[in-house]
Image (cartoon, rainbow, N blue to C red):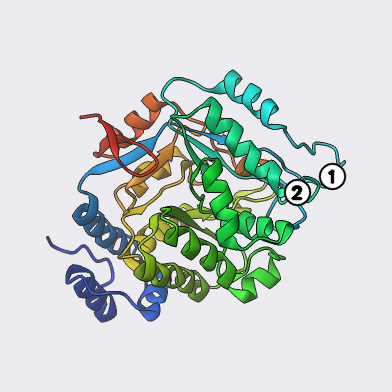
Amino acid sequence: MTLVTTHPDRQMAEIADKVRNGERLSLEDGVFLYRSDDLLTIGQLANEVNLRKNGKKVYFIENMSLYFTNVCEERCAFCNFRKDEGQEGAYTLSPQEMIDYVEQHIHPGVREFHIVGGHNRNVPFEYYVESLRVLKAKYPDVTLKAYTAAEIDFFSRHSGLTYREVLERLIEAGLETLTGGGAEILSDHYRKKMRVHKANIEQYLEVHRTAHNLGLRTHTTMLYGSVETLEERVQHMIHIRDLQDETNGFQVFIPLSLQPISPKASIRRRNSAYDDLKAIAISRLMLDNIQHIKAYFINIGTQLTQIALTMGASDAHGTIVKEKISHAAGALTPAGITREDLVWLIKGAGRIPVERDTFYNEMKIYE
């Protein structure tokens, strides 16, 4: 295949050789790609890597997002979801109230509950355990993908239990995998600037390490587009890559485009499509040991997701049903999507839609 280059450059050619020879990219390589304006070459290289790993298959899942509570002790600068106890709009659902909500909104085919929420000290750790237990008893065939690494760290501090003990209690109640949130940018500078006082870099990674050692395969994210440097974005990927070398426990990497605080925010307050596509493509090139890169349509939109599927992404996420966290900020995208629309979206990119379960077992291929 002839490499399309708009600006031939020796360093880009060296990176292309590395990619095609299966050599690992360095921090310097990743930063160079971010600073390059040659999106076509970056995207083409990422597409080559993805085709080697996954062929033309693009995965999606029928899932629902659930939020037991939005009361949170943290005050991260980018979050518009959290509330204080007693504040207007604050809520904490009982397990039965969540069952009632699910019964109103679930549809046949849902395979996964994606569960995240606030760090709420007004309820005991047992509340979070029982919430999973009740859901699993009512919906035994639906996978529980629950809680971020930051939530696990909060549970540990709240209960006095170790990470391992927290995870073992949750697994006994029905937990089958962790969500990827809470990573934001794995940089001390970023976390101080953005008031991220929850799990630090080492704690985020240690929670996932512990989960992997207990047999869980988990997810991981990067929230980009605020105060972080390009070097910090790439270093974030290297932190994840290093842990994957150690445990091989991550299933997918999910670049999350930061949403502005209001839906009325101008385009100048949003990441560009150019930056969003770079995030997908460079993630695919840097994270050689992770099978899938996800294009999260909630944050980047459905049409840009289609393009991302030709630039390194092999996962189009899922049906979701009433996403709240990104939409509590300024997301302008749909809060959910149908299976039929996801199939159409993937086929429109010249790819093969594959309905999966949480662990990327293929449930149905839409030829």
Rendered residue at 62%/63% (across/down):
162
Report the side of 195 relative to 357 (left or right): right
Assess whether mark 2 and mark 1 are in contact (beta carbons under 8 angstroms): yes
Q: Residues within 10 Å of mark 2 (few under 14, many from 20)?
A: many
Residue 94, visible in the rendered structure: yes
Q: Does 217 sit above or below residue 135?
A: below
Q: Amino acid at mark 2?
A: Asn
Q: Which residue is mark 2?
A: 120
Q: Amino acid at mark 1?
A: Glu
**Quarter of the image holding residue 318?**
top left
User: Residue 348, position in %: x, y?
Assistant: 29, 34
Secondary structure at badge 2 equals loop
Q: Does 113 sit above or below residue 15?
A: above
Q: Nearer the viewer, residue 66 or 275?
A: 66
User: Residue 265, position in %: x, y?
Assistant: 67, 47
User: Residue 86, position in %: x, y?
Assistant: 87, 41
Rendered residue at 49%/63% (across/down):
210
Q: Which residue is mark 1?
A: 85
Question: The C terminus lies in which quarter of the figure?
Answer: top left
User: Residue 103, position in %: x, y?
Assistant: 58, 20
Residue 147, visible in the rendered structure: no
